[in-house]
Amino acid sequence: MRLATIKDEPETVRKFVKAVIRGLKFTQENRQEVALVAKKEFPTMSEEDLKATLDRSYGDEAWSIDGTVSQQSWDTASKVVLGAGILKRPVPYDDVVDMQFMRALKPASGQSSLDQDEPPLTNLQVIERGNAAQLNAARQGVVPLSLGS
């Protein structure tokens, strides 16, 4: 997310973070539906490759369960994007990851505030909205922060 968006549109960022967390939860709880969505997103990928990719992603815990991006997760992800040439130089965790919105969504009581303020969505709507948001972010050149746990 761009720093200007975080500063100028904190409510939009809060809603985006909530949507990402809901999508991550859905991803963990509905693996068969995730496979259907993945097939829709990657129609040319063979069933075998799609299954292997998803199995590896779940096995490697590629997706954070609660939206938290740890130092270890960033270190792993940054090695991948550095190796692929997407990043030209290492970027420190604190320069990329800001967990303030995650902390705000986890009140001291430990109760989640994910479902407040918004009508319930179907699981497929959560994924489709998350995909659209991530696609829009990618088009704007924003680095996704939910790279693992």
Image: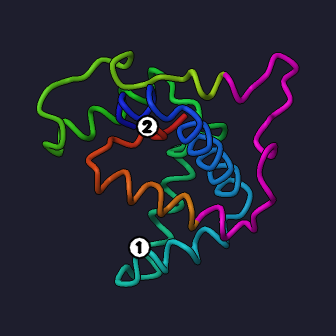
Query: Which region shows up in magenta?
Result: 104-127
In front here: 54 or 117? 117
Name the residue at 54% across, 31% down. 10
| Colouring mode (rainbow / by chain / secondary structure / one colour) | rainbow
Q: Position of residue 2 (x, y in %)?
A: 35, 35
User: Helix, strand, or loop for circle 1?
Assistant: helix
In front here: 140 or 25? 140
Q: Position of residue 95 (x, y in %)?
A: 33, 19
In front here: 104 or 12? 12
Contact? badges 1 and 2 (CB < 8 Å): no
Would you call the spot at circle 2 few (<14 residues within 10 Å), some (14-19), or many (20 or more)? some
In the rendered image, the quadrant that contains the C terminus is: top right
Q: Position of residue 21 (x, y in %)?
A: 64, 44
Q: For this view, does 44 lie left or right of residue 82?
A: right
Q: CA distance from mark 1 to mark 2?
A: 25 Å
Please check the rendered image and state whether residue 120 is part of the magenta-colored stretch, yes or no: yes
Q: How many marks?
A: 2
If you read the primary sequence from the N terminus, does the residue marked by circle 1 or circle 2 appear first?
1
The picture quadrant where one finds residue 105 is top right
Q: For this view, does 62 lie left or right of residue 17?
A: left
Name the residue at 79% across, 22% down. 107
Predominant SS along the magenta part? loop
Judge whether 83 appears above or below 119 on screen: above
Q: For this view, does 14 lie left or right of residue 93?
A: right
Judge whether 69 appears above or below 86 on screen: above
Name the residue at 49% across, 62% down. 131
Q: Position of residue 85 (x, y in %)?
A: 13, 42
Residue type at tag 2 = Leu
User: Helix, strand, or loop for circle 2?
Assistant: loop
Tag 1 residue = 49
Tag 2 residue = 145
Would you call the spot at circle 1 few (<14 residues within 10 Å), some (14-19), or many (20 or more)? few
